[in-house]
Amino acid sequence: MKNWIVVILLLWFFPSFGQEKIFRIGVAGLNHGHVGWVFEAHKRPDIEIVGIAESDRSLAERYVRAHGLSMDLIFESLDEMLEKTKPEAVTGFGTTFAHLEIVQACAPRGVHVMVEKPLAVSLSQAQEMAALAQKHQIHLLTNYETSWYATNEKAHQLLQAGQIGEARKIVVRDGHRGPKKIGVGPEFLKWLTDPVLNGAGALMDFGCYGANLSTWLLDGKRPVSVTAITQQLNPADNPKVDDEATIILTYPTSQTIIEASWNWPIGRKDMEIYGLTGAIFSDNAKQLRIRMAQGYDGFEEEKIQLDSRPQPFDDPFSVLKAVVRNQTKLSPFDPYSLENNLIVMEILEAAKESATSGKTVFLSK
């Protein structure tokens, strides 16, 4: 009884007692087309943007005006923003090349980091980032839109439960008509089509999704080999980088085909998993089909309509907060996890090498 009286008195005199502290985040860069997501998160009562590092003043002013914020949030450099605002975590919305610089600045200060996919522009940069994260004991997450998809979570559960037997082939298709054709902002287009700042073209931009999902679905297995073909089908829009990539990953008992393209007439993020007794089709974020084999070419199909993933996995910033606050522990090789995304970078590096050399690249054991 006395304990309850103490709690009631604390709540009476200190209304904030028992309430969760607002999650204070910083933003590194504004020239990524996905940056609107973090401004939407800022509208929530549990998350606050405390500082934005962006040296392009006109770009910063545009976003500040659009979202009704103050220019007092803008800092010329990431170091200045970190020193003056002390965020719990930083979200990276600049070039992929800048991801290493973000971790170099944040890790020694104990500030956690979430970057947009892929983790880095190269395996060597990814490994340096991982070493810093491990040395300074920070969380380093990579955000993919497909990590929010309830269909992908369901597909993973069904595969793990043996619904279609052991996986034999996974096919992942991602992309759209191309950055210029879909009308991305000029600041995003400039670096997305730059081989240094993005690491490649469609191969990096959309090949990472398939590598990430395959690694998750196959419990962190590394492929035996990687074979990739890239093309430049629209050189007028993409003069410096590939815009078409097909990547084949071979595993001891299965194969994954990744089709990454800036030439799809219709934007897509879908996946097919073929097992010994059936197939799972993740058509989009909420529509899933299961086909169980009957005879030679017959099948029984079940269609499933899903809602959003349960919290915190319905939103990347909720995941970041939950992980940082130790409210959620990511499962092994979760799509957000560092261990998964180091394998992703190994795959993408081998894919670039294969596409350049015209040869299959075998990964070291």
Image: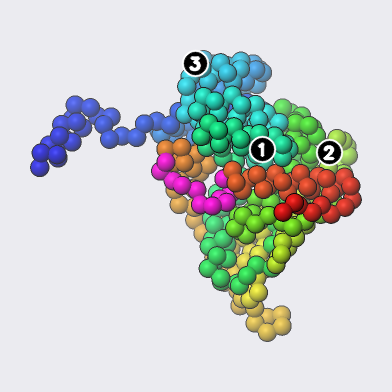
Q: Is residue 190 visible?
A: yes
**Which one is earlier in the sequence, the residue at label 1 or at label 3?**
3
Type of residue at label 1? Answer: Gln
Range shown magenta: 326-337
Q: Residues within 10 Å of mark 1 (few under 14, many from 20)?
A: some
The Cα atoms of the two marked residues, 1 and 3, are separated by 29 Å
Which residue is denoted by mark 1 in the rendering?
127
- Residue annotated with mark 2: 241
Q: Residue furthest front?
A: 365
Residue found 40% across the figure and 43% down from its top: 327
Disc 3 residue crowd, few under 14, some 14–19, many 20+, Cα 10 Å:
few
Count residues near mark 2 (Cα–Cα under 10 Å), then give few for <14, some for 14-19, many for 20+. Answer: many
**Residue at image point 58% right, 66% down:** 159
Give how far apart the Cα atoms at labels 3 and 2 are. 39 Å
Q: Is residue 160 magenta?
A: no
Quadrant of the image for the N terminus? top left
Residue at 65% from the left image edge and 17% from the top image edge: 55
Residue at point 27% right, 35% down?
A: 18
Quarter of the image where one finds residue 216: bottom right
